[in-house]
Image (spheres, rainbow, N blue to C red):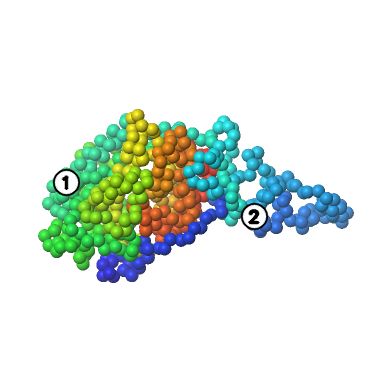
Amino acid sequence: MDSRRGKATRTSRRAGAAAPKGLALSTRDALAQPEEFPRASRAAQSCRGGCAPAGKSESQREKSFPGTQERRQVRELGARAKKAPFLSWGSQPSGAVPLEGQEATTVSAEGPVPSAFSEPHFSRAGSRRRGSSGSSRKLRSAPGPEQLPSLGRRESVPSDWKPRAVLEKLKLSPQEISPAAEVVNRVVHHLLRRLQSYESEFKGISLLRTGSYYERVKISVPNEFDVMFKLNVERIQLEEYCNSGAFYFVKFKRNPKGNPLSQFLEEEILSASKMLTKFRKIIKEEIKNIEDTDIVVKRKKRGSPAVTLLIGKPKEISVDIILALESKSSWPASTQEGLPINNWLGAKVRNELRRRPYYLVPKHAKEGSSFQEETWRLSFSHIEKDILKSHGQTKTCCENGGVKCCRKECLKLMKYLLEQLKKKFENRKELDKFCSYHVKTAFFHICTRDPQDSQWHSKDLVHCFNNCVTYFLDCLRTEQLKHYFIPGFNLFSPDLIEKINKDFLSRQIEYERNNGFPIFGEF
């Protein structure tokens, strides 16, 4: 095995093989953004559970009265006070526990701030709407990371934010779509014709449209497109990399002598890095021949399977062109328990989808701080597109005359939430490794858990979206997000995304939810 590791570190087997961690619920409540709220003062931090209700210790109160007579008066007043219950200006209701390290504050007119953990998922009985939608609301600041609220209380979701207005803003008009789609199609078809006529290994290549634009869940502006150039390969044998379930070495079952792909072999292994390098070189040379279009190839991103084009006119558009090997053989064993749609779309649909080809893209497995450059990763983007197109349990869901659900609307809002947060913190690195695929995977799991169309009625958009947010927060806290097709592969594994980054995203989402998603109105 070591001889096949290519350019990357040859001894590490940690990538994709991390054991799932146990449940690790965070006890933070509505958390404010750390960079916008100062840390607690040294005095507040040193106060750990022994503070008086007013936030001062007994010795601190006595020091404020330097005279002996005054001290005697204080003692007499203290003796009298024992006869009656003591309530300071900021004392909490009976049974409430002050936040650790936090000074007591006045109780809000809305009552104590509840936690976000106790209500079961997808229960309509526990509505969180309080007060009128027109009531004024201040953004709630929240305790810092070192301040731990009591469990068992739930944060009410402000009812005065308007998801329909946000979705209306995200709609793509035909006037926006047409010019962008026209330019992208022209560039893509030019490259495709060139590759097909090229007397080389890519002669049999064909087009497969994937991504959010073709799934009809693209948001904001049509500035990103994903295109897959697929190449059929026959009689291949997969060798799983480090029990990952997602990454594989690709070998040919027969002697590939005469096979145009034989030039990319590395000790019988089809080298993903070699093949991607040649694919990228051809595209880079060919864009020079596309007239009347300002195109550049973006610098290669380490570990990425895509060749990214930046088109300058009519506006800047990013096009990810991904090389993919198409295999029409049975899906790998690691997918056996994946695609859990039996109770949602039906066992018959699942069987039909599993009879379709699967794809391998030149995505390198992470190997410690480096990458294993000869590996290929499984891809089911074509199946994901079909699921989103036929997303209802009833076949007439969202069709003309059918009942409209809010599944896609929830997914759009979730994608937009992550997109806005990444834009807000673009100068930081905490959110760099999060992408819309994480959101889409969590969304598929929610659809599996809530398969009935009646659970996604259009009028329940706020409720359904909050369920999506809650589920995604649970995934971040527990560091568990199973790949929808490969359940043994954890997309939130500590080897892939550090816990500190997941905690950061969790705090930002909690803050947005607890304050009615103000970020939807920004940027």
Secondary structure at badge 1 equals helix
Image coordinates of residue 270 in percent, x first then y, are: 22, 61
Q: In the rendered structure, which amino acid carries the disc numbered 2?
A: Gly
Quadrant of image for the C terminus: top left
Choose between 513 and 68: the one closer to the eye: 513
Image coordinates of residue 129 in percent, x first then y, are: 55, 37
Residue 110 is left or right of residue 374, and the answer is right
Residue 156 seen from this side: yes
Residue 62 is left or right of residue 364, and the answer is right
Q: In the rendered structure, which amino acid carries the disc numbered 1?
A: Arg
Few, some or many C-alpha atoms within 10 Å of disc 2 (few <14, some 14-19, many ≥20)?
many
Secondary structure at badge 2 equals loop
Image coordinates of residue 263 in percent, x first then y, are: 17, 60
Quadrant of image for the N terminus: bottom left
Q: At x 67% / y 49%, what residue is drawn?
A: 96
Residue 84: numbered disc: none
Name the residue carrying label 2: 101
Image coordinates of residue 256 in percent, x first then y, are: 14, 61
Residue 194: numbered disc: 1
Q: At x 33% / y 33%, what residue is drawn?
A: 399
Q: At x 53% / y 40%, what residue is drawn?
A: 125
Residue 419 is left or right of residue 65, and the answer is left
Choose between 158 and 314: the one closer to the eye: 158
Few, some or many C-alpha atoms within 10 Å of disc 1 (few <14, some 14-19, many ≥20)?
some
Q: At x 21% / y 67%, what residue is drawn?
A: 267
Mark 2 vs mark 1, CA separation in Å? 66 Å
